[in-house]
Amino acid sequence: MIKYIITISFTFFVMLGYAQVGIGTLNPQEDLHIAGASATIRIESLNSINNPTYNDGIKLSPAYVDGNGTITIGNGTGPGGQLPLNFLIEVPDFIPNDPYGFGNTGTSVFNDNTQTSVDGQVTTVTFTAPQEAIVEIKYGITLFITSSDLSMAPPYFYVTYDQAVSVMTYFKVDLNNDGLSGVELTKDYGQKAQSYTTFDQGTAGYPYMNGQAYLKVPAGTHTLYFYGRVNDALTFNTGVGFGGAQDYLKIRVYN
C-alpha cells in the first residue's frame, strides 16, 4: 500500500512540474494563460505602497524586463536613472525666406572688398531635452550667391568675375540656454563647405548643402546658433543669402 502511495505522489508532482497553468480557462495555451477580455494581473510588490520610488500611485509606471526575465518597474539605474528616450523634432524651412522684405533672399552674410572671409549668424533654434541625452542634428540650407549685400534693397547682381567663392555652414550649441560661453564659442558642429564657380553667372539659382553632427546634452533647454561663412579673394564683393528657399532641420533626441 505504501509503494502505491509513493508512486502516485511522485507521478502527481512530476505532472505539476510540466503542466501548463490556466486561469479562467481549462485549456491553457502557454505556461501561464490568463483568459478573459478584461483579465488583469496584480503584483503587489510593484504597487505604490511597496515600491513608492517608481510608482507614485498617480500616473502609470513603465514596466521593464531584466536579463533574468523578471518584471520590474525600475529601469535598473536607480531612482535617478534615465528612462528610454527617443523622439524627433522637425523644423521645416527653419530660416526665414524674406527677412528684409526684399524677396526670398534669405539671411545675408556679406564679404566686402576689404576682407577675404566673413562669418555671420543666420538663425537660432531652441529645443528641450527632458533628460541627459544624445542629440543628432541634421540640416539642409539653400544659398543665394550674389555680388551684392542682400540686406540692402535691390537690384542685386550675380557675380560674373572668374573667381571661386566658397561658402560654409555650421552651428554652435548654447547648453542650458544661458548665452554662448567662451568654451562654447570655440566649438563648431556640422561643418559643411562647398565651392562655386563664378564665371559667366555660374552661381545663378539656389545651391543647396547640408550637414549633421552628434553631441551630448544635459537635461534642459538648449539653443543652436547657425552661422554662414563666405570666402572670396580680396577686392571682390560677395553676398550670400542663407535660407532663401526651402530648408529643413531635424533634431533627434535619444539615449
Image (cartoon, helix red, strand yellow):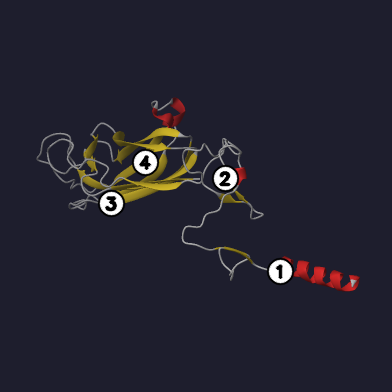
Q: CA distance from mark 4 to mark 1?
A: 64 Å
Residue in the foreground of this view, choosing between 212 and 63: 63
* The image quarter in which residue 147 lies: top left
With respect to residue 128, does 12 lie above or below? Answer: below
| Residue positioned 40% across, 34% down in the render | 222
Question: Crowding near pointer 2: few (<14 within 10 Å), some, many (20+)?
Answer: some
Give the label on residue 18, or none: 1
Q: Which numbered disc, 2 or 4, marks the residue closer to the eye?
A: 2
**Secondary structure found at label 4:** strand
| Residue positioned 59% across, 48% down in the render | 43
| Residue positioned 25% across, 51% down in the render | 207
The amino acid type of the residue labelled 3 equals Tyr
Which residue, given by chain and number where applicable, does mark 2 sit on? 73
| Residue positioned 89% across, 73% down in the render | 1
Sequence order check: which comes first, mark 3 or mark 1?
1
Sequence order check: which comes first, mark 2 or mark 4?
2
